[in-house]
Image (cartoon, rainbow, N blue to C red):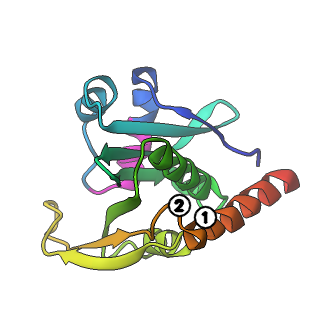
Amino acid sequence: MNAPVLAPLTVADLEEVALIENVSFTAPWPTSAYVTELTTNRLARYVGARIDGALVGFGGIWLMVDEAHITTMAVLPAIRRNGVATALLLELLQEARRGGARVATLDVRVSNLDAQRLYLAFGFVEVGRRIRYYDDNDEDALVMTTAELESSVQLAIEARLRSKVVERSERG
């Protein structure tokens, strides 16, 4: 599999985003929410991952003062476990740094163990729980955060993960 090519999402990508949303989430965001995010939310930054021209994943953050909040991340099920989510999250954390964020945070369903494993590999730790956070089934959300983004620990974690992404892409 070719390495993903990362680029900012645009409104033209939203048909493909909707396809990924619908196979990834029990309560997908409507396309209109993404239109707002991409055209009027000055806090929002979204990136897509393409392989052979097709959108296979995407993620987004909100830059709020000194914090980057990961709003969403999804990869097509058939493409998962090939480093796409890792590449996306590495780019989102770089975008967070470019935007002046000190830390990154996120909410994740307690049942989404695959996502939790990814976040733990990036150094995120659980710092709280939002009870009955998700409207579709009243599931709790774990609140997770990174160490300081510029800390030697966080930078070392990301450097190790980045080298794995490069290694994987070189193997093809």
Viewer-closest of 168 and 16 = 168
The vertical placement of 152 against 56, above or below, is below
Our reading of the magenta stretch's main secondary structure is helix
Viewer-closest of 48 and 97 = 97
Q: Would residue 58 be seen by someone viewing this image from the given angle? A: no
Give the secondary structure at mark 1: helix
Residue 150 position, x and y percent, is 53, 61
Left/right placement of residue 129 relative to residue 77 reads left
Instruction: Say what amino acid the circle numbered 1 marks.
Output: Leu
Marks 2 & 1, CB-CB < 8 Å contact: yes
Q: Which residues are magenta?
A: 18-26
Residue that badge 2 annotates: 150
Residue that badge 1 annotates: 155
The vertical placement of 103 against 16, above or below, is below
- Which of the 4 image quarters holds residue 111? bottom left
Residue 55 position, x and y percent, is 55, 36
Q: Is residue 156 magenta?
A: no
Q: Residues within 10 Å of mark 1 (few under 14, many from 20)?
A: some
Instruction: Say what amino acid the circle numbered 2 marks.
Output: Glu
* Residue positioned most to the right: 171
Q: Would residue 51 be seen by someone viewing this image from the given angle? A: yes
- Which of the 4 image quarters holds residue 11? top left
Of tags 2 and 1, the one toward the viewer is: 2
Q: CA distance from mark 2 to mark 1?
A: 6 Å
The vertical placement of 63 against 108, above or below, is above
